[in-house]
Amino acid sequence: MNDQNVLEELDQILAKSARFREGRVLGSMCSEPDPIVLEVFRRSYDLNAGDPGLSQGLVELENDAIRMMGEFWRWPQASGKIVSGGTEANILALWSFREGRRSPQQTQVLVSKSRHFSIDKATKLLGLDLVLIDCNENGQVDLDQLQNSISKRTLAVVAVAGSTSLGLVDELRALGRIAFEHGLFCHVDASFGGFVIPFLEEAGFAAVDFGLDLEGISSVCLDPHKMGRAPIPAGCLLWKDAQDLERLEFSVPYLSGGQTRLSTLLGTRPGFTVAAVWAVLKKLGKSGYVELVRRSLSLTHWFSEQVSKRRHLRLVRQPVLNVVGLAHRKLNPQELAYFLRREGGWALSVWPEFLRVVLMPHVDRTHLEDFLAFVERHLEKE
Ligand code: 0PR
């Protein structure tokens, strides 16, 4: 086939996919990347970050990007890696903890019930045991229950900083302190919140206590492909102590650089991702992310208020980040989501008690007005 025919067929098939810019995708935690990444792709699409000896440029870009993300999380000297997403980052964090444990008895990972399923995946893969802790009335991990669950079998605590369901944030300082006092590792899963939390205060919203510098916090992951405006796949894992990263290193003698040390789960990995994350960080800088958060959080508060005012809708909880949970007073969430999808093409994320709207950069006020008007037309009768 010639290029044109291939591309025509591709367009036809891709037409079956929802696109962010159409304004109907309201439940996704990914978004349309910053347009600079198209140019970055043209310049870097053939590079393999898994062979650093071949591309010293990528090594420089990755180190620079890690430093910038470390600054956001108040630890510019952080060691880290750009990875494929939150799942890979969570697996790597727990893997390093397992390799660094004092005794093989330490198999338990404590985390709140609001954790993302990648933590379940990681513990299963690594032969570790997941201990699920209830949430308190604010949707944060219950610290008393967590403390009472610590024993000689405990290896690590995972804190959630931006829960997948409602964007809620655990008490990171208190969790770090508990981990420190008991000699446990503590990983912060800020896959979603990692590009929001550092900018809340400057954007004019209620701040959340955070930082890799907090006592007892060992690592944090944040996903550039969620609120960072980078393309998929792009995650990042930051370590406070370089030795935690070094435990994951494999020395590979035969690659172009000779004695290359590799510490990601993937071998061959996209150089384009590294270049794109770097480019978006350079372009937006701290002030760019503050602006983005200001816009997303303003929209979040406006939308929450609108939901609260609707007769048949219920706001599940006052948002902390840019995530809104809403429920219908008559339809259950599955029925509601199915109706919205079938009749209006709206894509929201479905949870047992509510639907999730994520106020990502591609979501505009006009999209939300359309959504609310649709609900009013179809679901607010009598
Ligand atoms: N940790 C948290 C707190 C997450 O919310 C997620 C993903 C992960 C880890 C795993 O990250 P990766 O998927 O990058 O490995 N949360 C989103 C979710 O489950 C992922 C997502 C994004 C799903 C966009 C759908 C979508 O359209 O909702």
Image (cartoon, rainbow, N blue to C red):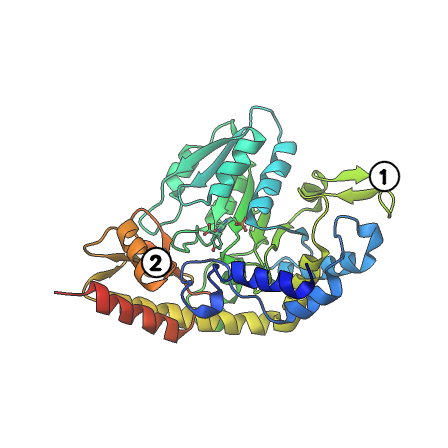
Where residue 124 appears, as percent x and y from the top left, is 52, 32
- At a point 63% along the width and 60% down the height, the residue shown is 6
N-terminal-most mark, 1 or 2: 1
Count residues near mark 1 (Cα–Cα under 10 Å), then give few for <14, some for 14-19, many for 20+. few
- At a point 48% along the width and 65% down the height, the residue shown is 20
Where residue 114 appears, as percent x and y from the top left, is 40, 45
- At a point 48% along the width and 64% down the height, the residue shown is 19
305 relative to 189, above or below? below
Judge by depth and name the residue closer to the eye, 58 or 138: 58
Quadrant of residue 47 within the rendered picture: bottom right
Q: Is mark 2 within 8 Å of ligand 1?
A: no
Quadrant of residue 211 within the rendered picture: bottom right
Quarter of the figure with the N terminus: bottom right
**Callout 1 amino acid:** Pro
**Alpha carbon of mark 1 to alpha carbon of mark 2: how far?**
52 Å
Query: Circle 2 sits in a helix, a strand or a loop, which is it?
Result: helix
Count residues near mark 2 (Cα–Cα under 10 Å), then give few for <14, some for 14-19, many for 20+. some
Res. 20 mark: none
Judge by depth and name the residue closer to the eye, 256 or 243: 256
Q: Is mark 1 within 8 Å of ligand 1?
A: no
Q: Is residue 95 left or right of residue 246?
A: left
Disc 2 target residue: 341
Q: Is residue 325 visible?
A: no
Q: Is residue 109 left or right of residue 302?
A: right
Q: Residue furthest front?
A: 1
Camera-near label (1 vs 2) is 2
Res. 253 mark: 1
Query: Circle 1 sits in a helix, a strand or a loop, which is it?
Result: loop
- At a point 59% along the width and 69% down the height, the residue shown is 34
**Callout 2 amino acid:** Arg
Q: Is residue 214 left or right of residue 250?
A: left
Q: Residue furthest top?
A: 105
